[in-house]
Image: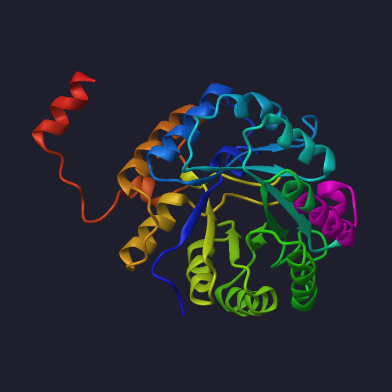
Amino acid sequence: MYTNRIEIVEVSARDGIQNEKRAVATADKVALIERAIEAGARRLEVTSFVNPRAVPQMADAEEVCTALPQRDDVTYVGLVMNARGADRAIATGRIDQLGAVAVSTDTFAMRNQGQTRDGSVEACRDIIERAQNVGLTAQATLAASFGCPFEGEVAEDRVIAMARAIAEAGPVEIALADTIGVGNPAHVDRLVSKVREAVDPLPVRVHFHNTRGTGLANVWAAIQAGAQVVDASIGGLGGCPFAPGAAGNVATEDVAFMLERAGIQTGLDLERLIDVNHWLAEVMGKDLPAMVGKAGGFPKVEETSEDTEERTAA
């Protein structure tokens, strides 16, 4: 059971680089966002409004927002953890959608945002209401839905109950996040199906990390179970500062390649994504995890003599 079109939320400018040790200049973050838009991204997580001491890479949130290109066809998402972050995001006048996060376990919730899991649900609902009060929308993500780095297995009934409680506040969707990459396709199929039924008619979004190599399989299982939106990060960068062992997000170019080859439209230009991958690798000073960034697409796009002349002239 899946649709013939999936929306990709591009998260490289926030989740992709937030845990990287190499500082990324504001201009490069904005350039990454611009290049992602050129490759077809239409909803992008552009920054997070968190304590810069906790996440130094996001200290320039307001500066990034000021420099965002004016686009009527693009939705800019700002991640916020509390009322203070929500107010900062709203004050920029450039964020279209607030991204709220609840956490499935008390230990991780305390590490991530200094509150219990129930407290994180209430904070999530408050953020959604704040967005709606000023004419914005809000998305909601349930972190560590498939397993916690501190408490281990997470009961599915708990995730479902939290999703239902947040859905009552009216976000645009409910997301299930595999923050530490421990999900498997069977678990994903089961939990996405149950949450989709619990929050209907709200869509389900999924956020997978490829920490243990199951990311793409989990994306496919989620779509078969009815998920309509997938988070992905160009190059496969990503990680959470508060989740030990968390590693890269599923790569946008890998997800786009898989889905497009399967006849599922994403609206993304694979060759442009690969170009962004190569550019971002230079910015980060290292090879990126994405497999399609290394191998290229298929069938190979043959370069014409006109393409060669144009690139040489540029």
Depicted 1 relative to depicted 238: above or below: below
| Residue found farthest to the top | 313
Report if residue 22 is visible in the image: no
Its colouring scheme is: rainbow
Query: Residue 229: x, y in percent?
Result: 53, 61
Residue at 88 percent of width and 52 percent of height: 110
| Residue found farthest to the left | 305
Depicted 181 relative to depicted 289: above or below: below
Depicted 158 relative to depicted 139: above or below: below
Query: Residue 82: x, y in percent?
Result: 82, 45
**Of the pair 277 and 124, the residue shown nearer to us:** 124
Depicted 287 relative to depicted 186: above or below: above
Residue at 30 percent of width and 48 percent of height: 296
Residue at 33 percent of width and 48 percent of height: 270
Is residue 305 toward the left or the right of residue 61 in the image? left
Specify the quadrant of the image occupied by residue 4. bottom left
Residue at 50 percent of width and 35 percent of height: 33
Q: Secondary structure of the magenta portion, mostly?
A: helix
Query: Residue 56: x, y in percent?
Result: 72, 29
Does the stretch in magenta take in 119? yes
The quadrant the C terminus occupies is top left
Give the magenta range: 106-128
Is residue 294 toward the left or the right of residue 230 in the image? left
Is residue 265 toward the left or the right of residue 178 in the image? left
**Of the pair 37 and 213, the residue shown nearer to us:** 37
Query: Residue 231: x, y in percent?
Result: 55, 54
**Of the pair 135 and 32, the residue shown nearer to us:** 135
Report if residue 78 is visible in the image: yes
Does the stretch in magenta take in 263? no
